Image (tube, rainbow, N blue to C red):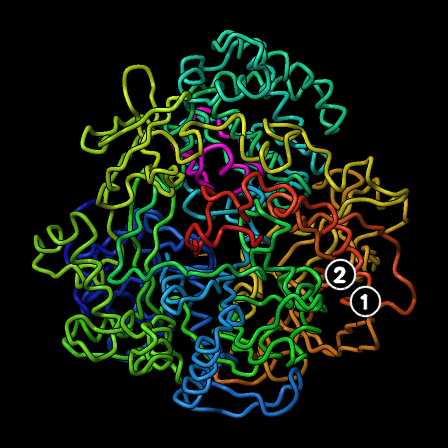
Amino acid sequence: MAKTKEFQQGTNETFYPGPSRNHLAAFPPKERWDDWTELDSRAWPKRKERHYSLVPTTCFNCESACGLLAYIDKVSGEVQKFEGNPEHPGSRGRNCAKGPATLNQVYDPDRILYPMKRTGERGEGKWERVDWDKALDDIAARIRKAIVENRRQEIMYHVGRPGEDGFTERILAAWGIDGHNSHTNICSSGSREGYQLWMGIDRPSPDHANAKVILLISAHLESGHYFNPHAQRIIDGRTNGAKLIVFDTRLSHTATHADYWVAPYPGSEGAILLAIANYLIQNRLYNRDFVRKWWNWQEFLASESPDLEPTFGSFEQALKTEYAQYTFDFAAKESGVEARTIEEVAKLVGTAGTRFSSHNWRSVASGVSGGWTVARALFMLNALLGAVATEGGVYPNAWNKFVPRPIYTPPHPNMWNETTWPREYPLSMNEMSFLLPHFLKDGRAKLDVYFTRVYNPVWTNPDGFSWIEMLTKPDLVGCYVALTPTWNETAYYADYILPMGVGSERHDLHSYETHDSQWLGFRQPVMKALKQREGSTVSDTRDVNPGEVWEENEFWLELTWRIDPDGSLGIRQYAESKSNPGTRLGVDEYYEWIFNNSVPGLPEKAAAEGLTPLQFMRRYGAFEVKEKIGAIYDQAVTTEELDDAREDYFGRVYTRAPKPAGPNIVPLPLPDGDDEGRRLVGIRVGDEIKRGFPTPSGKLEFYSTTLNDWGWPELAIPTYFKSHVHPDNLEKDQTILISTFRLPVQIHTRSANSKWLDEIAHTNPLWIHPSHADKMNIYTGDLVRVETEIGYYVVPAWVTEGIRPGIVACSHHMGRWKLTDQGQRQLMATVKLKHKDNKWALRREKGIEPYESEDADTLRIWWKDAGVHQNMTFPVHPDPISGMHCWHQAVRVRPALAEDRPGDVFVDTQKSRDVYKKWLAMTRPADQFSPDRTRRPFWMLRPLKPGREFYKLPD
Ligand code: SF4
């Protein structure tokens, strides 16, 4: 930069170098975070300087947990804005629009500031303010009673966005309950299942920045998964010359950047991927050495072709024969994409070598029955090319993630909760969460205490009216506690609403697979961190948060303490201070212990700056533990780990040696021990014992013995699956609705209190192709009825060429509603619910309007629409294997009737029951299909993992 004379306030100096003396395109250097200067935009044209303390935290508006810097005005003590934290290794200072919008959430005039207790009927909207102590004592007493009376299955914690790695799971383990319930089976289980079956780890970590070819299924640029951290690396890859292939039936943001936008018939993606695989196989373009060493082809031959000589040559021949059916013409017929295009894409993939990065998240894997087979077919391309844990390839996520050892690790529960892990779904990726109302209606269980946290099942889940029916019956749900920073549709049915902090008001630790690295991010209450930086003590976040907003970690520790005040249940010990026994553990001690004891390199790095590890994390908000992790599967197992080792026919090596100590370099769980107490420690490859993959075979599982043994032999190898919306399964005049795509500036439930985001996106019209619209004589803005199996909704049409002809799409996020004026007013319409027997109708009474509040902007609200709540009209569609709710709907689209209004919803919950039963009948339950009388393969992932004895089915 050219040298300039220092600007002097009050002089006639003409060149003003900016108050920060820093290039505007650069981040504030960390050395100046204690006093950062910017001009006050409201004082313009005067140049009035404002001074800020910059305090890091992480964004909580999606799972990526990008770094944020809070700009705290030194005079007012208020957060002026949030921008990116350049010290964060995952996000590198960049954010999507949702990060800075955290500010809206902090200052939302409609936010919930105090604990509230219901005074009327559930859903009536009558509340009284209650103090935290009373609420805690009441809830703790109920939980204690349930534990003492051995009704532990009646306590359930249901989480939407966890935003942290394991804190709450450990609280539940401390209580001795198998009460974890997640949202994952309405979110990403389809993909996870496909990846887990290959590599024993359920998520990919693609190295987009170094790839030669990138293949994405879903909209990954800001509106799909891992939004900004992956988006910026996809763009890095493109800048470096990578070719981008995007499969998406809808023209997404990502598709607009693609070299190949492939818009297949929904659910046919697997056919295209297997045709690409077949091209690589028939032309021997695959990495033969990698496949020979790392696929479990021996098991495939032993099981499927025992007469063949067990050689790699036999396998290659069998592979050619198996996949010959997946021609380009076959894929073209299934997908509607031209064979010539598929061939071009296949040839491009064939040039990638080990620099092939790919990712399937949500999209088709969450859309159709057998969606997990698509993720499996996609990863097969990586497995064929040897692009696994290579630069520019795909890593198992657990290797690009760092989870530190906590201060306490309570044992996993000695029980099995059949409400969340029912026998019908022994291979499900996660808890069968969205079937809860049906299970309770079936009489399988009831709940005494039910928590939701950052979760809004009435609005987010399919079949929301069945959730209302469940929540309004106290004999099914005794006490419902909603932990939430903002109003939501489910919280209206709660007994307690407890206000929780947004991303700048709470602690969490997290680490995500953004690239080949392991980093740790630290979310923190920024006001507390600032006060500590200035030498004050803050022991409770309620002292610095707005109103009586709390953070969850302090809440859970306090609740745990009150459940077992005298320690007689053995629970209190997990919430007790180590440094001051007899008192409750505080969050400072909790994090101090972790940073001092289980983050390699952090104490040294902090000491070099004269800081304690906790001070370092409070100051910078993130720490990179290790870069360039590489191919862990290929590491040799040390001789110390091979004590008393035994090797089986397939080269699996079992040992009695203890597990190696240290951070999670080796991803567990490996399949636990044989009958003699050994555990799988590695796999023979040539003369060496390598760490391998955490699968039953220790290798990449082309052939799944698990699927074969648990009743699905026809799907034991990557196979094309005709989904529930395959043309063979549609009725005349039905089409497919894609309902899951996201808008890049919205965030499920928490969007509604972000005024900047609401102004940008506040409606969800139905995407419909001109050729399709013509047939119905529909124009943009015309109302249409979308009829599902259980009801219908009414929505305006948007006629666009950005969708495959004949398919329609409607975005998630919209249709937020409230029953009374109490609630969020910037994106929640006021509605009336009508209910008779099983029939439910929702009609909008009042749209969005300007209103007076302490925020002058609320008088400037100009939008009226809030979209339509389509998820309510979807029945449950649990995939019989992954357990994933299959979101795509077979629908009929018609011009609206005269009586229809925008946003109308109608549902018959008896039909919901019928569809639930139909899908339940497709399962292959453990009672009949388990090969060893267990409930679930022990090697498969599970958030809380009961001891092996609880896996046994009762006789
Ligand atoms: S991608 Fe956007 S919403 Fe997600 S954590 Fe980053 S800034 Fe927040």
User: Which disc is residue 873 wearing?
Assistant: 2
Residue occupying image coordinates x 76% and y 55%: 917
Residue occupying image coordinates x 91% and y 63%: 897
Q: Position of residue 386 (x, y in %)?
A: 43, 21
Question: Which residue in the structure is indicated by mark 1?
Answer: 906
The boundaries of the magenta stretch are 192-217
What is the count of numbered marks? Answer: 2
Looking at this rendering, what residue extends furthest in the front direction? 955
- Residue 15 in sight from this viewpoint: no
Compared to 22, does 807 lie above or below?
above
Q: Position of residue 736 (x, y in %)?
A: 77, 45
Amino acid type at circle 2 is Thr
Q: Between residues 710 and 501, which one lies in front from this camera angle? A: 710
Q: CA distance from mark 1 to mark 2?
A: 7 Å
594 on left or right of 386:
left
Q: Secondary structure at mark 1?
A: strand
Disc 2 residue crowd, few under 14, some 14–19, many 20+, Cα 10 Å: many
Beta carbon at label 2 within 8 Å of ligand 1: no
